[in-house]
């Protein structure tokens, strides 16, 4: 698929980019190469290939999401500059 300098200029305008004529010509060639490569990839026979988002197997290293109580209320409130015994007291912001 070929891309014209006018199309590159239009995309640049949509992206609010100001490109010189030299840059438009440079990007026309680069985008043309990318589109040619994508066309070549489109020619591959992918029949029977399961779609995937990455060829590397991903293992979750996150812990299981379980509610737990690690600290008592007194332990947490002990570091607060001001408390009413049950909650933090903070300055009112309006």
Image: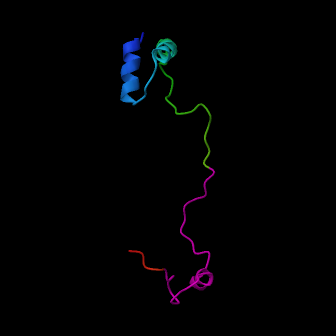
Q: Nearer the viewer, residue 40 or 19?
A: 19
State how many labels appear.
0
**Residue 64 at what x, y percent from top left?**
58, 59
Question: In this figure, which colouring scheme has been used for the structure?
Answer: rainbow
The residue positioned 49% from the left and 83% from the top of the image is 89
Q: Which residues are magenta?
A: 61-90
Q: Quadrant of the N terminus?
A: top left
Q: Nearer the viewer, residue 92 or 21?
A: 21
The residue positioned 62% from the left and 84% from the top of the image is 78
Q: Residue furthest front?
A: 20
Q: Quadrant of residue 74?
A: bottom right
The residue positioned 50% from the left and 89% from the top of the image is 84
**Magenta stretch, main secondary structure class:** loop
Q: Quadrant of residue 13?
A: top left
Q: Residue furthest bottom?
A: 85
**Residue 19 at what x, y percent from top left?**
45, 22
**Residue 26 at what x, y percent from top left?**
51, 14
The residue positioned 37% from the left and 14% from the top of the image is 6
Residue 94 inside the magenta-drawn segment: no
Residue 82 inside the magenta-drawn segment: yes
Q: Quadrant of the C terminus?
A: bottom left
**Residue 14 at what x, y percent from top left?**
36, 28
């Amino acid at each position: 698929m070929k891309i014209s300098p006018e199309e590159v200029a239009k995309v640049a305008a949509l992206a609010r980019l100001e490109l010189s004529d030299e840059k438009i010509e440079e990007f026309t060639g680069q985008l043309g190469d990318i589109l040619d490569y994508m066309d070549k990839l489109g020619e591959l026979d992918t029949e029977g290939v399961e779609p995937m988002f990455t060829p590397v197997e991903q293992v979750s290293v996150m812990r299981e999401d379980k509610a737990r109580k690690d600290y008592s209320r007194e332990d947490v409130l002990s570091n607060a500059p001001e408390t009413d015994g049950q909650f933090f007291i903070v300055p009112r912001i309006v």
